[in-house]
């Protein structure tokens, strides 16, 4: 995962992250890995609530912005707030993409894509790994 100059509110050593996260969580969140498509816990979830960073607990997305993109990962058309995520240019895989990270701890969440033609208010698809989030169900959900 490419290092940035940003200072995060939640900062831990790699040993601390490894101790707190499962090997699969660490591989995605701290090494910018990707879980296999269609296997994630939240790919098809319809539960109302807030999706938070699995590493630090910061709130990232709401179920109200989640939509069915049929891409194999949970998709959202907007983050919870403009400053809840950060964007990093990603030139891996031989193409230009935009990586999405948690703005509180710098953990990798997934990527954002634009102009794909989805009928959403932003024409963006935040393609996020289920393993990078925890769903906090709304009261009564």
Image (cartoon, rainbow, N blue to C red):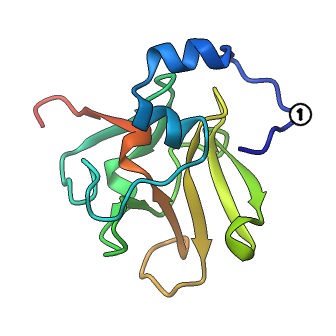
Say above or below: 41 vs 99: above
The x, y position of residue 68, in whole percent, is 30, 70
How many residues crowd around disc 1 within 10 Å: few (fewer than 14), some, or many (20 or more)?
few
Q: Quadrant of residue 89?
A: bottom right
Q: Circle 1 sits on which residue? A: 5
Q: Nearer the viewer, residue 1 or 65?
A: 1
Q: Residue at x 43, y 51 (%)?
A: 129
Work out which quarter of the rendered image holds the C terminus and state it: top left
Q: How many marks?
A: 1
Q: Residue at x 26, y 57 (%)?
A: 39
Q: Residue at x 37, y 60 (%)?
A: 36
The x, y position of residue 136, in whole percent, is 28, 31
Q: Is residue 72 left or right of residue 87?
A: left
Q: Is residue 134 visible?
A: yes
Work out which quarter of the rendered image holds the N terminus and state it: top right
The x, y position of residue 87, in whole percent, is 72, 52
The single residue placed furthest to the right in the displayed view is: 5
The single residue placed furthest to the bottom in the displayed view is: 117
Q: Nearer the viewer, residue 15 or 83?
A: 15
Q: Residue at x 66, y 14 (%)?
A: 12
Q: Secondary structure at mark 1?
A: loop
Q: Nearer the viewer, residue 58 or 94?
A: 94
The x, y position of residue 16, in whole percent, is 58, 12
Q: Quadrant of residue 137?
A: top left
Q: Is residue 53 visible?
A: no
Q: Is residue 25 left or right of residue 85?
A: left
């Amino acid at each position: 995962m490419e290092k940035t100059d940003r200072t995060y509110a939640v900062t831990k050593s790699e040993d601390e992250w490894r101790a707190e996260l499962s090997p699969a969580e660490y591989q995605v969140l701290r090494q910018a890995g990707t879980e296999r498509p269609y296997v994630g816990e939240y790919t098809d979830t319809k539960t109302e609530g807030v999706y938070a960073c699995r590493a630090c607990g910061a709130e990232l997305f709401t179920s109200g912005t989640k939509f069915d993109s049929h891409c194999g990962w949970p998709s959202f058309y907007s983050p919870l707030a403009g400053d809840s995520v950060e964007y990093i240019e990603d030139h891996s895989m031989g193409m230009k993409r935009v990586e999405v990270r948690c703005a509180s701890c710098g953990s990798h969440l997934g990527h954002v894509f634009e102009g794909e033609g989805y009928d959403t208010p932003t024409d963006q698809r935040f393609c996020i790994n289920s393993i990078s989030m925890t769903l906090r169900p709304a009261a009564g959900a």
